[in-house]
Image (cartoon, grey):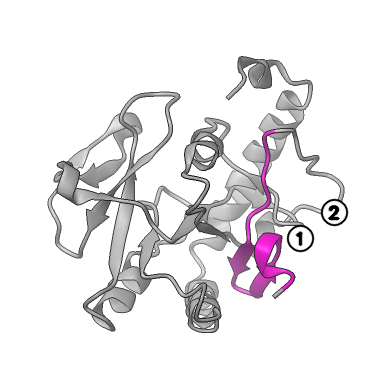
Amino acid sequence: MNPSIARNPLAQAKKTWRLQLREARLAASSDGIANAALTANLDALIAHLASDLAPRSIGFYWPLPGEFDARGWIAAWLAADASRRAALPVVAERHAPLQFYCWTPGAAMREGHHGIPEPAAQDAQDAALPDLLLVPCVGFDREGYRLGYGGGYYDRTLAAWPAAQPPLTVGIAYEACRIDDGVLEPEAHDLPLDAVVTEAGAHLAGRLRSR
């Protein structure tokens, strides 16, 4: 990522949005009904992807406070088909693209950068290149643009992904974190997500909008 991004004049506005939306997200994440609806909507989106887009491997995230916990959904998705694979991101070094390693329920974990658990098994045979990524959102808009934590990890990761195998990207968020159209100005390095799933439904964007 270009270091000039850190000096972008939109940075302060995004910082303000993050503070506001993280509070809203923390409140929304405590709603059991909202989480059940989000789970059902995620299940429906993945189940209804066309055969050429149906993922065999999914990269997801270890939930931080306020984030939807996808581990239960991932465990059920894996249990439905023994050929499926799931993976969690690993920060090998700060300001570098994420690396993904296989995860199963009960897998040994270790503390990684930023104190986030990551798979303990990180040999070459444990590495993964998921077909689809579940991406946590601090905020989002209907065009599929995401407001993250500001570290740029997913931007760098997608920019470095093999061009022949781009993953589908599905943001996970709550409606309380949706930003009005035109407010979240995309920057040169921003790519829209292919969908954002919330408790209200799936907002299709990117490559899925035309499907």
Most extreme residue toward the right is: 182
Image vertical order of residue 5 relative to residue 149, above or below:
above
Which of the 4 image quadrants contains residue 75?
bottom left
Q: Nearer the viewer, residue 33 or 123?
A: 123
Q: Is residue 22 magenta?
A: no
Q: Quadrant of the N terminus?
A: top right
Image disc number at residue 197: none
Mark 2 surroundings: few (<14), some (14-19) or many (≥20) residues within 10 A = few
Q: Is residue 59 above or below residue 190?
A: below
Give the residue drawn at x 77%, y 27%: 10
- The answer to which quarter of the image holds residue 22 is top right
Residue holding disc 2: 181
201 left or right of 187?
A: left
Q: Residue at x 15, y 44 (%)?
A: 120
Report the side of 132 relative to 100 (left or right): right
The answer to whether mark 1 and mark 2 are in CB contact below 8 A is yes
Residue 127 image offset from top left, x and y in percent: 25, 47
Q: Which stretch is magenta? A: 189-210
Residue name at image x 68 percent, y 53 percent: 140
- Secondary structure beneath label 1: loop
The quarter of the rendered structure image containing the C terminus is: bottom right
* Residue 163 percent coordinates (x, y): 52, 46
The image's mark for residue 142 is 1
**Residue 33: percent from left, percent from top:** 52, 78
Q: Would you say 57 lies left or right of 44 here?
A: left
Tell me how far mark 1 sits from mark 2, CA to CA.
7 Å
In the rendered image, the vertical position of residue 68 relative to residue 41, given as above or below: above
Q: Position of residue 97 (x, y in %)?
A: 43, 33
In front: 35, or 80?
A: 80
